Image: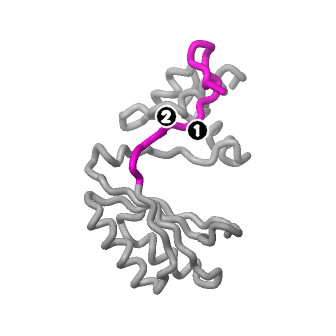
Amino acid sequence: MDISQKKQVIQKLQDKLPLVPEPYKVIANEIGISEKELLDYIKELKNNKTLRRIGAVLNHRSVGFLANAMVVWYVPAERIKEVTDIMVSFPQVSHCYERELLNNWRYNIYTMIHSDSFDLCDNTIKKISQMTHIDNYEVLYSTKELKKSSMKYFLDEDNKNPC
C-alpha cells in the first residue's frame, strides 16, 4: 500500500462508516485495495499505537437521554476495582475513568450517566452511592453540548482544521 492509500485509509476511518453489512469492504473498494490489506493496515496502526480505537458516537439527546451527568467520585485506591465494577454494571453509565488526584480537585473516578429525566439520573447516582458506600462525590449536569467531533487528519486544503 502506498502513502497516498495509507492517508486515504485514515481519512475514511475518521468519517462515518458506511451503514452496510461489510463497511470495510466498501472502504477498501473506494481506496482501490483489498479488504485484507485494509484490515492488516488497521491492525498495524493499532499495534503501533497510532490508532487507539474505532468507535461509534451516539447522539444521546436524539434517542431520548435528556439528563446527562458527569459524576466525580473520590474512591480510595484499594477499592477502585471493586467500586468501578459496581458502577459500570449500571446501564445508565456510559463512561467510567480513573484520573490522577489533584491538589485542588480530590476526585479520582469519573462516570458519565445518561437518563431520560433528571430524577432518574439522580436516583441512579444515589443507588451507585449506596451500593458502593461512596458518598464523596459531585454531580456536574450537562447544560449545553458545545462540541461533538474529533480531530481530522489529512484533509484537503478546503477542509483544513482551524488551528
Say if the magenta span includes residue 113: no
For the residue carrying disc 2, how many other residues have a C-alpha within 10 Å: few (<14), some (14-19), or many (20+)? some
Q: Is residue 115 above or below residue 149?
A: below
Q: Nearer the viewer, residue 43 or 115?
A: 115
Q: Quadrant of residue 38?
A: top right
Name the chief secondary structure element in magenta. loop
Q: Is residue 159 magenta?
A: yes
Residue 158, above or below 22: above
Question: Could you tell me the amino acid type at mark 2?
Answer: Tyr
In the structure shown, which secondary structural element does the residue marked by tag 2 occupy? helix
Q: Of residues 47 and 146, which is closer to you in this image?
A: 146
Q: Check if mark 2's residue and mark 1's residue have beta carbons within 8 Å.
A: yes
First reached walking from the N terminus: tag 2 or tag 1: 2
* Lateral position of residue 46 relative to residue 81, left or right: right
Where in the figure is residue 74, as x and y percent of width and height? 57, 76
Residue designated by label 1:
39
Residue drawn at point x = 34 percent, y = 72 percent:
124
Q: Residue at x 72, y 23 (%)?
A: 3
Chain part drawn in magenta: 142-163
Q: Could you tell me the amino acid type at mark 1? A: Leu
Q: Nearer the viewer, residue 1 or 68?
A: 68
Q: Quadrant of residue 31?
A: top right
**Image quadrant for the N terminus?**
top right
Tell me the crowding category of disc 1: few under 14, some 14 to 19, or many 20 or more residues within 10 angstroms, Cα based. Answer: some
Q: Nearer the viewer, residue 20 or 117?
A: 117
Scheme of image coloration:
one colour
Which residue does the numbered mark 2 point to in the structure image? Answer: 24
- Percent across and percent down for residue 92 are 36, 64
Describe the element under mark 1 as helix, strand or loop: helix
**Residue 20, x across and y down, in percent:** 36, 34
Q: Quadrant of the C terminus?
A: top right
Instruction: Give the distance between the C-alpha atoms of the residues marked 2 and 1, in whole angstroms.
Output: 8 Å
